[in-house]
Amino acid sequence: MEQEETMSLKCENIVKIYQKKEVLKNIDLEIEHGKIYGLIGRNGAGKTTLLSILTAQNPATRGSVTYDGMPVWENQQALDHLCFSREINAVSPFGQNTMRVKEYLRIASVFYPKWDKQMAKRLTKLFHLDVQKRIAKLSKGMMSMVTVIVALASKADITMLDEPVAGLDVVAREQFYRLVVDEYAKTGRTFVISTHIIEEAADVFEEVVILKDGMVLCKENTQELLERSMHVSGNAHDVDAVCEGLCVYHEKKMGRSKGVTVVLEKGQSLPKGYDVTVQPVSLQDLFLAFCGEEEAI
Amino acid sequence: MTTAGLKRALGYFVRQAEIYVLCIIGGSFALAVYMQIINGNGIAQMFQSVPLVDLWISGVAVFTIDVSSYQYCYSMPVSFGCLRKHAFFGTLAMNILVIAQGLLFYFLSSVWFGSKEQTAGEKVTEGVLILSLFLLLESFAELIGIVAMRWGKIAYFIMIGATVLASMSFGVFVSLSGTYGVMGLLKEVLGGSFMQTARWLLLAVAVSIAIHAGSWRILKNFEVKM
């Protein structure tokens, strides 16, 4: 852990409007130093847009983003600490996909001031990437590996990855998470990882940020969030009695039975004396409870 | 820190310019030789058309680079943390280098391959004329690039259309040039005296400044879409 404790990336009242659609709605978020964040949300929730705005790749319609108190927009001093490695478009006529992997990595090395050439070399070997191949000729998984290499070798203090495991097989995903955790342990860099494969990544995320409809639904320590969340099931009458006054999500009814996900507030607990089953929930269950559609069977 | 960012951007764009220049020069020789072989000319005339072919390929390069600049010159550097203004100046520097190469290599190869005898005054006038045309071409391509950046996919069709139109116009121009030669006809059309060509240069510079100023207004809020 080499970095100062005070560094943080902060956004306040971020609004992003595309044409007439409000994609991000008054987002306040602080990415603190030395943590691994998981950014999860459904398709179209605004994850990529948020990461783009945090790294000044896209302008916000309203609001401000600061790194260590400095505005990030068109500020080299702030941007030198940030990296957002995004997915590469495979079919763009003049895009990065037309380049060879070697050339793409060389260009990344020009712009990232702390670029670790040895690490980039080591990772290309580890992922068995043919650096002479054009990016467009790579499989989806291989393209993801290229973005992972850029993210890790950039050595940026705050590194963001957009769907880095998309298309990766289970072995490569395991390798990726191990690499992130190793790098985090060695350097204390901050990682923000957006993903749809929640279950596998849950153990890696120290904090989780859940986006829903362009708003931050929750930003909390993953373990603490899971400790105060549970699945309550049983007779509908008993479940209703137990859950009265509590935050209840994702009700599922089956005849007279009912199951709900409950998230307790600090100091709250489930009342005793009811014939209900209480089970722990996983991060994926919780995400489904927060973002899944209500359903009645 | 800001200077370091500019240095990195220039490092990237100058390197790109070097690659383009090498490709243009190599391409000019290859195409000139190919054209002479097709025409059944001997080894003596093999490299005679190199100067003109170099000008043509440089023009195509300047046009293509500018038209695709919103993806190739801005998206990637900005996504790697380059400032928009640095990417803008870097692209300008790259275009200037390619144009300078076009001019320089045209005159050097004209001397080497002895395609024509010219006085110093004629050379300057011709240089100013070529520079004006390059600037106008670059400005036109920048305009298309900006239209593409602003209106997305529709612009691909505009780009393809404009490229085909530009190539056809050049083809028609070359075929009409006949005994005048391409440069001769250009001088006939645009005026051959130094004062006349200087006016063209002033016009080209004014157009270039106006288009690049407009381009910066859009580019300063450029959004990376990859």
Image: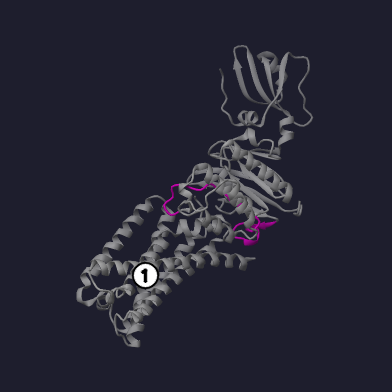
Corner quadrant of residue A200: top right
Q: How is the image coloured?
A: one colour
Would you say residue A63 is visible in this rendering? no
Residue B44: tell me if it is visible.
yes
Residue B128: image x %, image y %?
A: 36, 79
Q: Position of residue B160 (x, y in %)?
A: 34, 55
List x then y, in percent, for residue A282: 67, 29
Q: Residue at x 38, y 68 (%)?
A: B58
Which residue type carries mark 1?
Leu
Observer-nearest of B201 and B104: B104
Image point (22%, 73%), residue name: B177
Quarter of the image for residue B146 reads bottom left
Mark 1 — on which chain does it sit? B
Range shown magenta: A69-94
Q: Residue under label 1, please give it.
A: B136
Look at the numbered disc 1 and give the secondary structure of its residue. Answer: helix
